Amino acid sequence: MVVVMEERASEEQIQRVVAQLVQMGFDVHRSTGSLRTVIGAVGGEGKHDPRLLEVLDGVHEVMRITEPYKLASRTFRSEDTVITIGDLRIGGDEVIVMAGPCSAENEAQVLSTAAAVRRAGAKVLRGGAFKPRSSPYSFQGLGEEGLKMLRTGADAHNLKLVSEVMDANQIALMDGYVDIYQVGARNMQNFTLLRELGKVRKPVLLKRGISATIEEWLLSAEYVLAGGNTDVILCERGIRTFESYTRNTLDISAIPVVKKLSHLPIVVDPSHGTGRRDKVAPMARAAVAAGADGLLIEVHCDPDNAMSDGAQSMYPGQFERLMAELRIIAPAIGRSICQEPVARRGWGQ
Amino acid sequence: MVVVMEERASEEQIQRVVAQLVQMGFDVHRSTGSLRTVIGAVGGEGKHDPRLLEVLDGVHEVMRITEPYKLASRTFRSEDTVITIGDLRIGGDEVIVMAGPCSAENEAQVLSTAAAVRRAGAKVLRGGAFKPRSSPYSFQGLGEEGLKMLRTGADAHNLKLVSEVMDANQIALMDGYVDIYQVGARNMQNFTLLRELGKVRKPVLLKRGISATIEEWLLSAEYVLAGGNTDVILCERGIRTFESYTRNTLDISAIPVVKKLSHLPIVVDPSHGTGRRDKVAPMARAAVAAGADGLLIEVHCDPDNAMSDGAQSMYPGQFERLMAELRIIAPAIGRSICQEPVARRGWGQ
Amino acid sequence: MVVVMEERASEEQIQRVVAQLVQMGFDVHRSTGSLRTVIGAVGGEGKHDPRLLEVLDGVHEVMRITEPYKLASRTFRSEDTVITIGDLRIGGDEVIVMAGPCSAENEAQVLSTAAAVRRAGAKVLRGGAFKPRSSPYSFQGLGEEGLKMLRTGADAHNLKLVSEVMDANQIALMDGYVDIYQVGARNMQNFTLLRELGKVRKPVLLKRGISATIEEWLLSAEYVLAGGNTDVILCERGIRTFESYTRNTLDISAIPVVKKLSHLPIVVDPSHGTGRRDKVAPMARAAVAAGADGLLIEVHCDPDNAMSDGAQSMYPGQFERLMAELRIIAPAIGRSICQEPVARRGWGQ
Amino acid sequence: MVVVMEERASEEQIQRVVAQLVQMGFDVHRSTGSLRTVIGAVGGEGKHDPRLLEVLDGVHEVMRITEPYKLASRTFRSEDTVITIGDLRIGGDEVIVMAGPCSAENEAQVLSTAAAVRRAGAKVLRGGAFKPRSSPYSFQGLGEEGLKMLRTGADAHNLKLVSEVMDANQIALMDGYVDIYQVGARNMQNFTLLRELGKVRKPVLLKRGISATIEEWLLSAEYVLAGGNTDVILCERGIRTFESYTRNTLDISAIPVVKKLSHLPIVVDPSHGTGRRDKVAPMARAAVAAGADGLLIEVHCDPDNAMSDGAQSMYPGQFERLMAELRIIAPAIGRSICQEPVARRGWGQ
């Protein structure tokens, strides 16, 4: 902590600050300049609220000098975390694409979409069974029925499965179905949920809250890591800004920033990040070009009749074209994308 | 819903939109102008996602014409909701002040603070037992022990009690202690929690999320109302903006806006709204001047040694002075504030 | 400047930073802790870009310890600046209200509005002759014709006049008409204009840019002050946030913040701050309750037929009622508002 | 314009709205549903302020149905605008890179940097002679001296030149030097300047204001276009959000949005968009992947000793590597980037 005193601060005020810092357990270094005194405090930071010093008389400003998170920081671990699920590696050289419908609706829809995304090169099936919706009157998901369909779809096409958990009491139930627990943006600071996910031994994909700073996001990851679960995947999905043309503003610059601050892998969700199908492909390309470790994309076999988020779901043909573009881009930064396992049979729509 | 077609939209494109709207269950009115066609759709809105129309060819823009919330709207109920807890009325002529410490720390602290806020004119004791904290390493509250202390403090000084519930599984436990359940900003879209609070029969104080639009806030209130609990108190506590000098930007204009859109009472939390003790009094005065139905203020008998949020907690003497100022302001808009029950004995600090 | 090194920073990296700071002209203090080294640099700040240090290897963070503005700061001048124009004092005990139409449209409109605002207690007439408009197709003001009307209106009712200057080349022309030059939000960083206004000897009312931080705002004031013009009035008029129900979010908390950082008077414009007539009165009351030195309010004798901003202009009767409310509020913080010079004759609309 | 009436709106209120719309010159269509009346108004929009209707009694909401800009819109011109300067085409298949120092400092610096960027494949030299700076105490540029150096540097290496114009009275002077006038973010709504640039016959590169919506940005372009200058290049350079880790948040999604709304070319400035050298390359790659027509990048032959923006200026070697990466990415979307005119001789730093 660095405490900058006001120019006119009295010796008594300075002593009061020093005393407070010592009481907090800090080692104190005092620098007296011609204009002002600056007090450096080293030690037990993280536990203390800098505002307690800010409100003391004569204090001009207080600055923290360590991040409040530890296990999520590159300072703690300098090499990249690579998360392994069977033969899948997230955070390595390959850019991993997770794709599928917003919600599981029925078996045919899940199977058909799973087949389409697998054919195009996705490695993980995404799909919701518990849906957090702004309005109580919107479709809220099929629950366990949906999870069964998703697991069947994933197994049928050799895909891993990621699905959203909305509440701590769903964890046990979901454990029989998912490979990755997804925490939605609205739950990024649901600390009860995060704490419980720290106890499971499956990866957690943690979406950034719509107005969360990168520091708050890493602090939420810290809740999971501190519980003993080291497999956290960060997911940028758009932040709220004054611009309302797109649903959110996808913060592509968060990718290089997170890469510097943390060792955790980061993926990007351009579907929620833009809210409109026609903006998904450009933003997915941008994310890979900027260094994302993966993508989370909504694809639906029949978006026009989807029960939720149809407007931001890609047609299978669009998704296939996007994957072909990404295979050109990834090598520019030394990465690869899965080749299509079977021959392409026309673009579809 | 109003669908505005592009200037060059073809008849086929227009027909496609009309067909979709009819399928969604709308009555359709078509207006053909010299430049463009505008299609009005009346009926089952709220259930449908306007973006499904936005992505159709030839569509320029889609606009909703009804709010997605119903029970929270002034259209549904034109007179103000007044919430009654014993002899306390929230939303009536009297401006209700809720005050107390951020967290319950020990019995002496709670009793001393309760006495001080009661003496100054508060009617409700606030205080946390379950604390949502950004960092897993911060003080997380005393749990049930804290609730006991708070209930004792409230009863000793004839105050009602409001305290935060963080998770649906805490509701049953808290029911024995609190008069008002507080939902924190981070949980404004914890829909599992909101749904459960719709089943209780005590008022819910719902804080606005740090980046929630007013519409989203009212939709979250709708979750509680739709469950059958009609007693929701809205609480503005600051939104996140680019300005970082204050912790948040307290959105005072939300007061008149909410008063127009909804019949629910609205209170303001200037402590979290600013994050700094020296900004609390000006913003509390502003809130009352703008028409707030109440205030939620952090007061601590010894803020310098508080275990959380000490920097934004008022000294008892500051709080007493503020109450005196508010008693001058409230009559400007035809309202009152509780007179001090006992003689004032000096300002303290 | 304080430079915090990374935990693993090498001695060479530390030496590189020290050398750079010395080259920049700073005195350097080095504190070596068990985990990290912190380097304090005192001296010629303000001239240097901290990012030049941020990009050096081994640097964790760089923090400025002085504000980049000087003349605008309370550190430079601790007592409040009171600006005098004839018998008018802005920044003293009296809250000064400036009111009038968005634009001068014709002589009758200006005279009628001036009479109305004077009767209600305003001391300054506001009105535009040069109008910055987002669209090139909107009404752009009457130019010098408008200035003449405004001067005539002000003189007829013993009011001072404030009007907007859009470009440095309008200053000379306007000098014959206005008492206060207004700089609009869009021009807050038009440095050519600010520099020229530093040379005039009339007060400048400087509106905050729609997304300007308080620091940037004070730096723009510094441009005027550095030119030798000490009479700057700051004007908060709303910032841009994600919330779109109101046109802008009026940042009431900027009032106490500016009062702490600067000695300059601050007034508030609730008309542009909200964009809607029915929100002006609550926000005007809030501004006075929070400590504003004055208000800038759009009033029009016939808002329904105004050529610009009619929707946010008050009717004379509404304005009169507001002034009566403000007279109740101001004493709560030891201030006053001008009494009506003539007997009130009913409210009008 | 579409006016949605409140559910309880009376026939008188509806008639009042219809009368107002007719007076404004609109054709009016009235749709009466079981719950509410919706009034469609077609005709002279753009000239009218929708808020004039919003404040009428019984009005629930007013929505515009046409964009307020015309010449900048794809509705006005459906094919892409390609701007030609000699043999350079901006907005065609080739992605055009403009690079150079923040400010011209001396002849050697300009020549050396020009040589470096040309060698790497840039087609336009960027560099400032008039510098808008937040602080009056910062370096403000060399003025005409700087323009001479830049012209010399551009000519020596067969580059076009883009440089910033800060005030309308600089246009004539600059005409002898520049190929493209740059309007900075802070001047995006300096309407006096825009209007004058509508009269010149050279392209204008118009940066997006730090908090400008895309609509406001296109309206500012409209000022130039309406003056008769059809050659406007839009430049995204980051918007202000709550996230403060990066200087601004570069809005990559603005690229596909602008491409849909307008026919004008759009380039991206990742240097100002991030403010940090190590974030420039990822964001430049992202911009090209998302479909930008060009880039504007700060490169300096010696960034450590730059007089302004050194921290965000690339080293020549970094820039060369970036160009190589972009040559891999561009073909993914059917575009190209200039091949290096001379053999590469090692990366430099």
Image (cartoon, coloured by chain):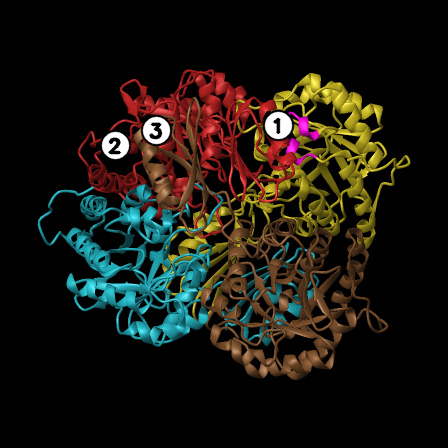
Chain colours: A brown, B cyan, C red, D yellow
What is the C-alpha distance between the residues marked 2 and 1? 59 Å
Binning the other alpha carbons within 10 Å of mark 3 as few (below 14), some (14 to 19) or many (20 upward) gives some
Q: Can residue B111 be seen from the camera position used here?
A: yes
The answer to whether mark 2 and mark 1 are in CB contact below 8 A is: no
Say which element carries label 1: helix
Q: Identify which amino acid the numbered label 1 is placed on.
A: Gln
Tell me the mark number nearer the camera, choosing from 2 and 1. 1
Q: Is residue B231 above or below residue D271?
A: below
Say which element carries label 2: loop
Q: Position of residue C91 (x, y in %)?
A: 30, 27
Query: Marks 1 and 3: same chain?
Result: no
Q: Which quadrant of the rendered structure holds the N terminus of chain A?
A: top left
B111 vs D283, nearest the viewer: B111
- Specify start and end residues of the magenta stretch as a single range: D303-313
Residue, disc 1: C20
- Residue C121, label in figure: 2
- Residue A319, label in figure: none
- Residue A9, label in figure: 3
B53 vs B154, nearest the viewer: B154
D84 vs A299, nearest the viewer: A299
Instruction: Write the residue at 40% across / 73% down.
Output: B168
Instruction: Answer left or right for B18 relative to B42.
Output: right
N-term-proximal mark, 2 vs 1? 1
What is the C-alpha distance between the residues marked 1 and 3? 29 Å
Residue B338 sits inside the magenta stretch: no
A104 vs D233, nearest the viewer: A104
Q: Position of residue D283 (x, y in %)?
A: 69, 46
Query: Marks 2 and 3: same chain?
Result: no
Say which element carries label 3: loop
